[in-house]
Amino acid sequence: MNILAIESSCDETAAAVMIDDKRLLANVVDSQIVIHRPFGGVVPELASRHHLRNIYPVVTEACRIAKLELGEIDLLAVTKGPGLIGSLLVGLNFIKSLSMVLNVPFVGVDHMAGHLNSPFLSASKPSFPFIALVASGGHSSLFLVRDHDEVRLLGRTRDDAAGEAFDKVAKLLGLPYPGGPEISREAGEGNPEAIPFPRSWLGPDSVDFSFSGLKTAVANHVNKERQQGRRLAIADICASFQAAVVEVLTEKAILAARQQGISNLVLAGGVAANPSLRQQLALRCQAEGMQLHMPELEFCTDNGAMIALAGYHHFLKEGPSPLEMDVYSRSPLLSQAV
């Protein structure tokens, strides 16, 4: 089964071509970072216009790399949410149109389900069940995953997500958007113990997250330094902030695995590309005797390959999506009672 998948939930226009769940033929991503950087964040209207202009060239390029014609596609997949409504609609309506023209079925895929499937794109695949830490700009969540379509929410952020905190702190420090890579780069030159920023644990048994207090602590430190006329130690601030985020994410993931009695752990989402998080979580899993699986960096950020894989498994169980399917801004997976 030749699968063509589109991801357009935020600021990347992505398309992938895959054969079943076995072989990835093409994975093309057109990033909008340059467009949104002057504004310090994603501008929804600009994002949807860029998707509209670039979706056909991106799909064409994916098919060229895969050496397949559109007429050879057997299944279409597309992100239906969560995300920016205008951006999601561009991808969904494009796929619906292709579905009618080519007379092939399509499936709508939850963006979170895509991230949960991303580790299966690697050579070393996790085994079920596993605990998944999905950390990105909009979400920081922990899931118990028993199968591709059997997922239970264990914990989630109560305010800012990890990636959102990275972006806000970077903006506070005058660093370019997106903040994650910039803070990681600066942190490499700093002392992670220079500033004792707080860790929000929310109780000994909680696997929820909260990063708004940490963001406020950084803001207070920056304001105090400026008021006293001192030059900001950017590298130390970034290293200390990053250390706080990484420690909370790591320890809560380990705690969730212990609580569920599961020794398989998965890290996914855009923040999963952070080198410090990957290193620290790997060390903690090794110390705990747990198996850690992480997607390659190209599959951490938004991409079409993870949507193709999730779409394939959704189609096998649920069949095609109806033509009247719509997009949504909030994932049902994050609306589960914890």
Image: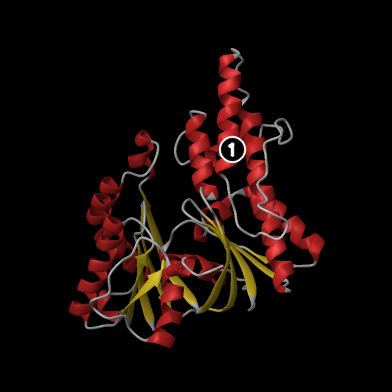
Residue ID at (24%, 61%): 56
Q: Quadrant of the N terminus?
A: bottom left
As rendered, which of 218 and 78 lies closer to the eye? 218
Residue 72 vertical placement versus 117 (above, below): below
From the top left corner, tell me how far across and down residue 186 is, in percent: 60, 34
- Identify the amino acid type marked 1: Arg
Q: Does residue 267 appear left or right of residue 75 in this picture?
A: right
User: Which image quadrant is residue 243 in?
Assistant: top right
- Find disc 1 in the rendering and name its residue: 185
285 on left or right of 94: right
Q: Does residue 247 lie above or below 70 as drawn? A: above
Judge left or right: residue 300 versus residue 28.
right
Q: How is the image coloured?
A: secondary structure
Query: Image quarter for residue 231?
Result: top right
Which of the pair 200/36 is nearer the observer? 200
Describe residue 274's horizontal placement relative to residue 205 as left or right: left
Residue at horizontal 39%, vertical 86%? 318
